[in-house]
Image (spheres, rainbow, N blue to C red):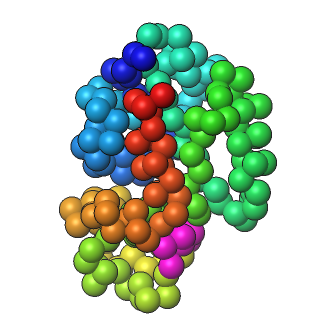
Amino acid sequence: MNMCESLYIFVEDNNDKRFFERIKGIISECTGIKTIFIVPHVQKPDKLINGYISKAKKTPNNTYLFVSDRDSNHFPCMTKIKDKLSNKYKSLDIEKIVIVEEEIESWYFSGLKKKSLLNNCEDLDYNCSKEEFDNAIPEHYEKIDFLNEILKYFDSKLAINNNNSFNYFIQKLNIINTH
């Protein structure tokens, strides 16, 4: 069995990239992989992303995961999301897709130790939507600054316990170098 040396994680946008950059240590710990590339895909041409996926698949000792928000307002069914993504990116393997329940903001919130940072957080659950999360941001913060502030207090063990899709992502990481 060859051990993976590089992991590509395809994410939607820079808020997602910021989150994954913060948890690279956790990812490395789960996988034993030291070289991790976080690649936002939403604003890039499909052909380019397909090329990156193909490269990750063809290069020995590389692997990848493709992370996408569920956003149940548009796609209530996870299977439909995976089908849509695999039709859009022909090189994408369905088993490499991880769906964030509901959106990446829920992963930020699920690992937040210091709940006092948020307004009205008692109304949020750990699968909150982007809009629900945004409404809880204190007025004196811009969203990007606030997301960075949350990452200072992010606890991955808390997030694993609070959010099923984050837990699933960590489980996917744990099996990368065991197959």
- Magenta stretch holds residue 126: yes
* Picture coordinates of residue 62, whole percent (x, y): 43, 19
**Rendered view: 158 above or below 125:** above
**Residue under the image location 31 percent in, 80 percent down:** 115
Query: Up-down: is 2 above or below 23?
Result: above
Residue 118 within the magenta-colored segment of the rendering: no
Q: Is residue 24 visible?
A: no
Q: Could you say which quadrant of the image residue 37 lies in?
A: top left
Specify the farthest residue to the left.
Answer: 152
Point out residue 99 in the picture as x, y percentages from the top left corner.
59, 50
| Viewport quadrant of the N terminus | top left
What number of labels is visible? 0
Q: Residue 73's quadrant in the figure?
A: bottom right
Q: Nearer the viewer, residue 71 or 170?
A: 170
- In screen coordinates, is 154 left or right of 100? left
Query: In the image, 75: left or right of 17?
Result: right
- Above or below residue 98? Residue 137 is below
Percent of width and height locating residue 154:
27, 63
Q: Which residue occupies the foreground of this view, 86 or 165? A: 165
* Residue that appears at 38% across and 65% down: 159
> Which residue appears at 33% of the width and 42% of the height?
30
Please report the bounds of the magenta region as a residue range.
125-131
